[in-house]
Amino acid sequence: MQQEDKKALKYHSEGRPGKIEVIPTKPLRNHEEIALAYTPGAIIPAKEISDDVWNAYKYTNKGNLVAVISNGSKISDSGNLGAAAVKPLLEGRSMLFKIYADIDAFDIEIAEENSDKLVEIIHSMAGTFGAIELSNIEAKQSYFIKQQLCKLLDIPIIDDNMCGKAVCCAAAIMNATEFACKEIKELKVVLSSNDEAISSTLSIIGIKHENIVTLGENKEQSLSTADVFIGLSQKDITESDITAMPHDPIVILLSGAVGRIDFEKARLLRPDAIFSTCSADAPNLINEAIAFPYIFRAALDTLAGTINENMLLAATTAIAMLARRPVPASLKRKQEKELSYNREYILPLPSDRRLATEVTVAVAKAAIESGTARHHISDWEHYCDTLLSRLEREYSFHREIFAHHRSSHKLHSRYTRAMPSIISY
């Protein structure tokens, strides 16, 4: 077993196994509070919700709760490993939801291969949640499930690729074209394998649908006219293949392509290329955490019925525009001498806290303007303050975890304070 593998296993198993837990948000110190929390106290809001289902957003955690659901049918390049095996990935995604956007997320692993049955199961439990994310499900199956659930439910249903890597790719391309001196509407894009989420999102930013193709058997011919190559699978492509691309190619290597192409060698062969990868050691890091937590935060806060193209475009544009702005010194890591908009900095880092306001506000406004929002935010300054408050609370909380090794009662002190409510915006 390699050292990195051992490190990963230790990370997941050390202390309390896994990566997430459930903590109460209300005090439970005496008999009176027990009665308020459970019975007879909980019966009162139950009746209010029975009279008006929207009261669930007022009296329960529904409005801040996302279900991250999978059957494990597509776990990265490992294929179908099953429902039990996908749990570590869903827990990780739940962590990102919480840390970056203060969203509570439940990971739900369903041992079911039949798409119709999956729709039935998810539909039956949907009342618990304010939104649903389909994750690590085979692409065609995920698309079918999403389409069916959108017909049945009035909460946002979206797959992890669409609100994660697809938005990141689109934002990277949006900025890379400026340095490549190319027009978005004229770009020709080649994907190493078919990916409906990425294709759809690239169309949203203005790339013609007919100009987005999948790598054919004749690689040189496919790449010879490609302005953009997106590697997302284990297709047999090497760094030398990239030499066939026109001037200033935009090359995006996602997790499935990592290891198949030697990034450093490819950069030597094509010094004019603009690279973006999912490797933290390389420039222009593709990290889904710069997108999906904030898209969902906005969808929940506006009580959006869906996450539509307008919202995805708003997220993509906000991410791209943030990379063009000067990075405050306080946001730079010690080893980073310079972070300014250039060929090796076309995406903001996940640690950039400005994402919490810039992306969330842009998506929330798009939800309202496109008509899918059922709650309209009027005081945007107050909303931004609330977002920053959420972010600081989570960052502080997790700093305490590392400092106190989860042994101090201080870890739970944040829950004695009032939590922000969407109805106050």
Image: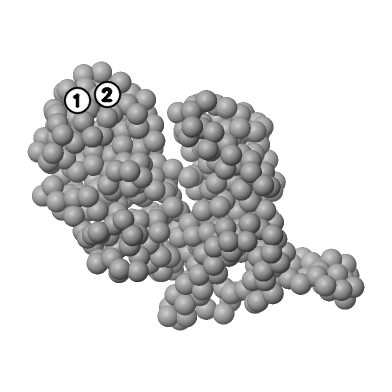
Question: Which residue occupies 16% across, 23% down?
Answer: 221
Give percent across and percent down for residue 209: 27, 40
Q: Is mark 1 on a helix, strand or loop?
A: helix
Question: Which residue occupies 40% across, 59% down?
Answer: 351
* Badge 1 density bin: few <14, some 14–19, many ≥20, Cα 10 Å: some
Question: Is residue 210 in sight in this rendering?
Answer: no
Question: Which residue occupies 36% across, 45% down?
Answer: 280
Give percent across and percent down for residue 225: 14, 32
Tell me the kind of residue under disc 2: Ile
The residue lying toward the viewer, choosing from 151 and 243, is 243
Question: Which residue occupies 23% across, 34% down?
Answer: 264
The residue pinned by badge 1 equals: 241
Residue 121 lies in quadrant: top right
Q: What element carries label 2?
A: loop
The residue pinned by badge 2 equals: 237
The reply, left or right, for residue 30 in relation to residue 129 is right
Give percent across and percent down for residue 285: 33, 47
Q: Is the C-beta separation of discs 2 and 1 under 8 Å?
A: yes
Figure check: 226 above or below 103? above
What number is the disc on residue 261? none
